Image (cartoon, helix red, strand yellow):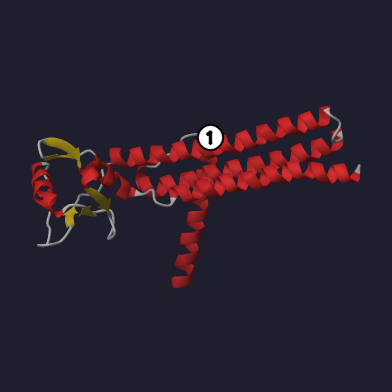
Amino acid sequence: MAGRGKEEEGYSVEAQENMHVALETFKESLIPIGSEEANKNVFATIKVMVGGIRRRLVDLGNVEAPEGPLKIQLMIFNKEHIPLVMEQLKEDGFKPRSDPGSQYVKIDVPPPTRLQLMDIAADVDRRTKSCVGALTKIKSNTSQRLMKALENEYIEQKIAGVANKNMEKTFIKLEKESVKIGMIKKIEILGKWYSPDNDLEKILYKTYQEAQKKKIEKSESKSD
């Protein structure tokens, strides 16, 4: 039975590893999301008349913000389209500029509105829920596998119980961690407009505020 116990422990270990992978994937997906996305999204809605056909600006070039969210840079694939793009941008109220012979069109844009930032924060919420959903699915699938293994007498009840307990412990920890990561990302995006969306966020936000307060106090005491 010792061999079986060791084999069983693979169920919970595998589930825990998969949960950590899901969390890391979620964290990586949040890296490119920020206030510059709000401005990029504005340009995704612009259409330019080319050869009698209205084409999306994002199909004519790349929208980038290498110098920060308020300095948009368009890399137009075909230089012949630049005058058309410049004209359309001016009609839409922007002040584009481009150096002769360059494929780039540069535009300074105002800070994104609260509504635009709320849309980006909503995307973070969707990704957070997706991550929690992935964690839940891993736990559920592994629980079902453990139940079948128990029914088929591959493992003992005691060992299955330990495996489920270990898995549940990891799930609770990583669910909390994913909500915390999403919350901090939303705070970065929304700033003063942020407010917790659920009870867990309220608890985590209170802890976050206390940690930030201590950080400031520590920094001030060092400077004195």
Q: Residue 30 location, x and y as percent?
A: 44, 48
Give the answer, above or below, for where 141 lies relative to 124.
above
Q: Residue at x 19, y 51 (%)?
A: 109
Locate the N terminus and report the quarter of the image it occupies: top right
- Give left or right: position of 66 versus 51: right
Give the answer, above or below, for where 47 lies relative to 215.
above
Which type of secondary structure does the marked residue at label 1 adopt? helix
Q: Residue at x 77, y 29 (%)?
A: 147
Q: Would residue 95 be seen by someone viewing this image from the given angle?
A: no
Q: Residue 215 location, x and y as percent?
A: 49, 60
Q: Residue at x 17, y 52 (%)?
A: 78
Which residue is at the far top?
151
In front of the other: 94 or 8: 8
Which residue is at the far right?
1
Q: Residue 88 location, x and y as percent?
A: 11, 43
The amino acid on which the numbered mark 1 sits, given as a three-letter code, is Asp
In front of the other: 30 or 185: 30
Q: Which residue is mark 1?
A: 199
- Give left or right: position of 8 versus 17: right
Q: Residue at x 53, y 39 (%)?
A: 131
Q: Residue 158 location, x and y as percent?
A: 86, 36
In front of the other: 13 or 195: 13
Give the answer, above or below, for where 35 lies relative to 167.
below
Q: Would residue 162 be seen by someone viewing this image from the given angle?
A: yes
Give the total of numbered labels.
Answer: 1
- Give left or right: position of 44 versus 15: left
